[in-house]
Image: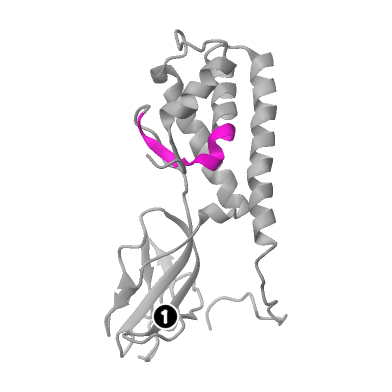
Amino acid sequence: MSSLFINAGQVMDTVAPLLNDPAKTDYTYITMLPYLNIAIGELNELLEESNVGVTNDISPVYIVKAGVNILTNPPHDMIEIQELGERQRGTNDSFIALPRREFPDALPPSRSLLFWCWKRSEIMFNLNGATTDRDVQLKYTRRPFWGAQNELSIIGNVSAHMFLTYKTAALCAQFVGENETRAMILQVQAEKALERIIGISNKGKQQIMTRHRPFRAGYKSRGY
């Protein structure tokens, strides 16, 4: 396994000493695993909410044929679409971002797909489709950490090791050991670990040069 990733057992091995059970006599893998998965779910939501870099991804290029108005297989780990771009099929042109609509509509056919909306886990375009084949690419928010089936399951990037350790230990102390004092101390450590993850991400973002978009009254309106 790459040193960039951790498995569930590695996290639980560091949880057990915090619960005063380094041999995992009482806090076995089976006992700790449900609480590790709760911690993973919470971490995903916190990182997505904070737009931490590890949650950002870019999809492969999809081909949308002329007359087709739907993209049925978006990335399996996608939580939210940040931007959808299109270009003429077979070119190396830059992708042009399309506006988002809440619901699909049938507009006159165009070379472009015109807009997109996300409905029932499907991405829909102008109901009349485009008159030319289009390349489509998504910039999206993904779920960066994965639930564990057992101690060998790969769960994600090593950067979250300490948060998952403290958070899992806090949950186990609270709901298994019923030791509220220990749980509170561990929760504080989990919050500090999360602050470090977000702080490191924000520090990296300071190096990204961005061009400020001009203000205009209708900038945030969706569709045409």
The amino acid sitting under disc 1 is Glu
Element assignment for label 1: strand
Asked if residue 177 shows in the view, the reply is yes
The residue tagged 1 is: 86
Give how far across and how far down residue 177 sits, in percent: 55, 11
Picture quarter with the N terminus:
top left
Give how far across and how far down residue 21 sits, in percent: 52, 10
Q: Which residue is drawn at the image coordinates 52% and 79% (left, top)?
A: 223
Q: Is residue 6 left or right of residue 69?
A: right
Give how far across and how far down residue 147 sits, in percent: 41, 37
Q: Which residue is drawn at the image coordinates 45% and 32% (left, top)?
A: 37
User: In the figure, residue 168 lies in which quadrant?
Assistant: top right
Q: Is residue 177 left or right of residue 9?
A: right
**What's the coloring here?**
one colour
User: In the figure, residue 115 lies in which quadrant?
Assistant: bottom left
Q: Is residue 131 above or below residue 153?
A: below
- Within the magenta stretch, is there residue 149? no
User: In the figure, residue 78 lies in which quadrant?
Assistant: bottom left
Q: Is residue 85 above or below residue 166?
A: below
Question: Magenta part of the protein: which range?
Answer: 152-163
Asked if residue 127 shows in the view, the reply is no
Q: Is residue 198 above or below residue 68?
A: above
Badge 1, how many Cα within 10 Å: few under 14, some, many 20+?
A: many
Give how far across and how far down residue 12 sits, in percent: 47, 24
